[in-house]
Image: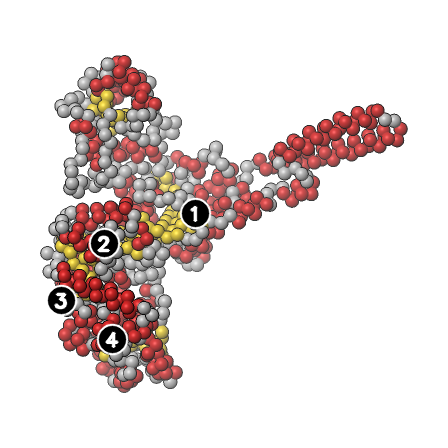
Amino acid sequence: MPSLAMPARLVILTTDGDIAPDDRTGRTALAAARAGWDVTVLCPGGGASTERGSLESVSVVRVPVGTALRARAARTGRGHRLRRLTQLGLPDRDAYDRVRAAHHAWVRVTSARAAERGGTARTALKAWLRLRRTAHRVRADVFRWEERRDRRPARGDWGTRWPALLDRDVALGPVLERLRPAVVLVVGAGLLATASISVTRLRTLGLSTRWVYEAVWADRDPAAPDADALDALVREFAGKADAVTAAIPEPAEGTVPPDRVVVVREAPNASTAPTGGHPRPALRDLCGLHGAGPLWVWPDGPLPAPPPGTVVGALAELGDHHLAVLRDRGSAPVKELLRLADEAGLRDRVHLPAPPGNRPGDLDAYLASADIAITGPEPALPGLPDRDLLAARYALAGLRLVSAGDRPRELAKAVVENIAAGPPAARSWEENIAPLLDRFAELAGHPALEPVAVAPEAPSGPVPIWTPISRDTPVRLTLGPANYAGQLSSFAHAVCRSRPDVSAQVITAAAASGGFRYPADIRLDSSQLGRLTVQLEQIERVFAHSTHVLADAFHPLLGRFNGNHIEGDLPALLRPGLKVALLAHGSEVRHPGRHRERHPNSHFNDAPEGLAERLTAVAERNRALVERTGLPTFVTTPDLLDDLPTATWAPLVVNVDAFACDRPVMERARPVVLHAPSTRWTKGTDRVLPVLNDLHDRGIIEFRLAEGIEWAGMREMVRDCDIVVDQFAIGSYGTFACEGMAAGKPVVAYLTEGVRERYAPELPIVNATPETLRETLESLLDDRTATMELGRRSASFAREFHDGTKTASVLAGFLT
């Protein structure tokens, strides 16, 4: 079996909670995920509780941030306690000015009264005047001293001057540390302290977490609010980063040595070739130009517009050149351009075409017939990301970007020279970000996709790798959307391993809160499946890229466009000529009533109230669909053939190599017996616990009950035990039994005769019921040599039936 890769975890910290696939952070996250990283974007949220979402295969976690530390800072501002003692009534400059004016007015009135009086009264008033003047002067001096003190740069005191950073750290820091990432990328200085503090704390726990700071212009803006605190923050923490990245070199200068800086200039994503449908409109055709001279483009976007007078003058210099204006025709520069063109008699050479579409490849096809693009003068800071992005976007379409100054003749000369130079060297975002992804991999200690042994941190085991969906393969398989126990991921790996002509994409739709435990190409938040944009994207993914579809669990594949069941999607899926098959795992087709009739210990006898009735309706609807459509149908456990006799068994796939071990069984005086129910009532746990506990208490076995254990811990428990006890209520065996056999352990479970005799006669699982379990375990302990041999047979069986080879063979007939 080929090596399986464990993706390193990358956490991207950003203060921007609105992550989109076309912004810089979103594109960074998606590029890392496509390179094999397990990516989580962590940011402040506006809700009252933590919100979990996804951006394709990227997890997005939004954490609410409190205001306690900001409120505390407001109550206990600098000098506050001193003011309470010496400056009561002077909280700010306005209050000081009011008190000062009132004092001067009082002095004027009182001094006049003292002058009018004589004797003792005059002396007393003058003494009172001196005392009040002295007190006021002291209060004024103290106020002005504290005012000067407050205006001094807060060197190293960012926490006091910018308490919002502490609120963010208290909220996001613990979440970041629980994720235990290999690499942290912090975007901007707003969470710089959190990244540095959390990474330091993780390293004290023995982790080798590294972090990268993405410097932005705003971090060095002297006019920014709290600029003093911002400067102190960057000076204190930026130098501790293991690397610094930026869109242009200037924001990163001086933070770390140059060899630790990775510049990732802005660029658009690589264009996607058109995928059918109507041909893309060409700009020259939209302008009505056929065989005319060179065509300029005035782009839309955030950069300065070229001076209209310069453009019209340059057009006049070049008699056969035309201009296509993509900017809003209602904008002031375009209105001025059209006015000047009318006056110069050049209006017929200035065109206002319809904009390009939004589908992949639209812009490139739209611009392909143009020759040059013009913008306004270079900004004060050349190389800013906006200009880089526009230049790269147009370069991918074969156009150079020319800046227009104030002299028409110079613009005309530059246009001619740039057209003669030919298309520019074009770089995409994927090319530009590759060095940063390499740096992430270097910091993590290994390339993100390097085959590694099973890592203990994995929540659900090593990650199956499959050939990404590609038009280079004749068979393009889409699998989704339930992906129960990661079986679709394992199926995709197994098929692509044995079939180089197959590429695949796995789509998972699950609750954003904890639903995405298994690898997938596309991860959809099930709460968002009713949104039109999500549905349209899903339709595009399936129809544009697939020749075959394996729909599992009878869940809808196209969102909720056609309802909540695959039945609604089938007319659309079958119409374009896709080959569609169905995959069932268990309760979606297992009929509770018939199961109770066949099995006295049926788990449906212990089901929560009302569940059996609901599952009966589900099973009957799904069986009727299979019989009515006649679609190829596969089941992952052989007992389901009792409910779907026309289906085919496609065995469960487990990572046999990950569980394989050479630890001998049955050599301990008290053999270790392991039982690990995912849900007790489905496994019949409560029926067998008395037997297992009794044998344990009597010292015959060492019984271990494993519940809520993550994959890595469970793998170790399976490899360390002597006997695996699986289920006693279903009549078949599942993933846990397969993993036990892969580890070379004898497995005890309740199996129907049909499972044993018809579909896997050499199945080495020891059959037992709750009533016979004690006798069965005692016989295994009495003949330890035979039990050891049973373990060896179990390992062979798991490799033959459950390493994916058999499953790929079963699916081969469908994938023709």
Distance from disc 2 to disc 4, alpha carbons, whole Å, reads: 32 Å
Density class for disc 2 (Cα within 10 Å; few <14, some 14-19, many ≥20) is many
Distance from disc 1 to disc 2, alpha carbons, whole Å, reads: 31 Å
Q: Amino acid at mark 1?
A: Gly
Instruction: Judge depth for marks 2 and 4 and give the one in front.
Output: 4
Res. 312 image quadrant: top left
Give SS at disc 2. loop
Q: Is residue 813 visible to the viewer in this orientation of the structure? A: yes
Q: Is residue 492 visible to the viewer in this orientation of the structure? A: no
Where residue 197 appears, as percent x and y from the top left, is 46, 51
Residue that mark 2 sits on: 557
Q: Is residue 277 or residue 756 the one in the foreground?
A: 277
Distance from disc 1 to disc 3, alpha carbons, whole Å, reads: 52 Å
Give yes or no for contact between labels 4 and 1 (Cβ–Cβ under 8 Å).
Answer: no
Disc 3 or 4, which lies upstream in sequence?
A: 4
Q: Residue at x 15, y 72 (%)?
A: 759
Give SS at disc 3. loop
Give yes or no for contact between labels 2 and 4 (Cβ–Cβ under 8 Å).
Answer: no
Instruction: Judge depth for marks 1 and 3 and give the one in front.
Output: 3
- Protein image colouring: secondary structure
Where residue 323 appears, as percent x and y from the top left, is 23, 23
Give yes or no for contact between labels 1 and 3 (Cβ–Cβ under 8 Å).
Answer: no
Q: Residue at x 36, y 69 (%)?
A: 707
Distance from disc 3 to disc 4, alpha carbons, whole Å, reads: 21 Å
Disc 2 or 4, which lies upstream in sequence?
A: 2
Outermost residue, right direction? 119
Label drawn at residue 596: 4
Give yes or no for contact between labels 3 and 4 (Cβ–Cβ under 8 Å).
Answer: no
Residue that mark 3 sits on: 646
